[in-house]
Image (cartoon, rainbow, N blue to C red):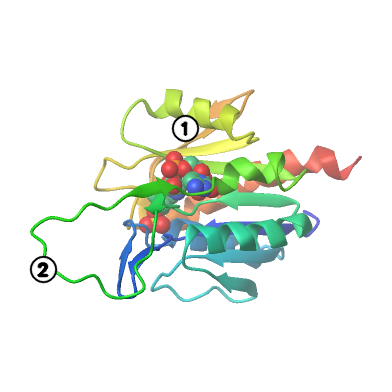
Amino acid sequence: MIPPMTILITAGPTREAIDPVRFLTNKSSGKMGYAIAKSAADQGHRVILISGPTNLNVPDLVDYIPVESTQEMYDAVEHWIKKADIAIFAAAVADYQPANISEQKIKKDAETITLKLVKTPDILGSAKQKFGYQGVLIGFAAETENLEMNAREKLKRKGCDLIVANDVSRKDIGFDTNQNEILLISVDYIERPPKASKQHLSHIILEHAVELAAPRDMD
Ligand code: PMT
């Protein structure tokens, strides 16, 4: 019997405003993160789901924190992560945001316009280093090349206990699909479950998460 834990999950895309009606975003549907949230809630864990805009129904018995921009997701994670035993970052967070948000809708008079972008805050990378989080930290890696090598680099750079890597160059898995194929990479092991539904894979991800959390519980 697994003791109930508090699991924070980020999901969906973030939106970076350009002006009052336009924004930069990506193809994340939220399906991967919501599948994990549903499985975790079904198992009796307390789930805090911090999500960018999606068309999905929020799973039952989940504490839902809607956000739009990366900064809003950053602030929500900073606030809620203190309560978590496990944090899983499945959101597709924008890496850049416009340097300035125009207060008025930008006119389309000019033939070309240049948008200056600046880096967004790294939420996953801040969990241990800035927020002082000490629970199990699980990041995702969305890669289009050198999947394993790039995922290992993220595991180390972002201070994760586990990275869930997926190849987002494929049409049949990754963004906005019902199925996924993932690599689970920790410092000690690598596991390659076969391609399956995101709902099925969410159980495997949770098994690893709970196992990683178990030794800490006995402290
Ligand atoms: O939502 P779906 O349509 O179901 O698609 C699922 C998915 C492809 C979005 C998901 O499986 C996935 O790969 N999520 C991570 C997407 C991503 O942003 O990967 P990344 O390699 O760019 O980022 C690495 C990690 O850092 C991720 O855990 C990300 O949430 C986190 N990050 C990234 C940038 C940033 N500023 N802050 C972050 O926390």
Tell me which residue sits at (52%, 69%) in the image: 67
Q: Quadrant of the C terminus?
A: top right
Q: Nearer the viewer, residue 69 or 172?
A: 69
* 209 left or right of 185 in image: right
Can the viewer see residue 151 in this picture?
yes
Which amino acid type corresponds to the residue marked 2 in the rendered image?
A: Asp
Q: CA distance from mark 2 to mark 1?
A: 52 Å
Can the viewer see residue 211 in this picture?
no
Q: Nearer the viewer, residue 74 or 87?
A: 74
Count of picture labels = 2
Provide residue 199's location: percent of width, then percent of height.
48, 57
Q: Quadrant of the N terminus?
A: bottom right
Residue behind mark 2: 109
Tell me which residue sits at (41%, 47%) in the image: 118
Query: Disc 2 vs disc 1: which is toward the camera?
Result: 2
What mark, if any, has residue 110 been given in the picture? none
Residue behind mark 1: 192
* 193 left or right of 17 in image: right
* 41 left or right of 166 in image: right
Tell me which residue sits at (55%, 57%) in the image: 10
Sequence-wise, the earlier of marks 2 and 1 is: 2
Provide residue 174's location: percent of width, then percent of height.
35, 48
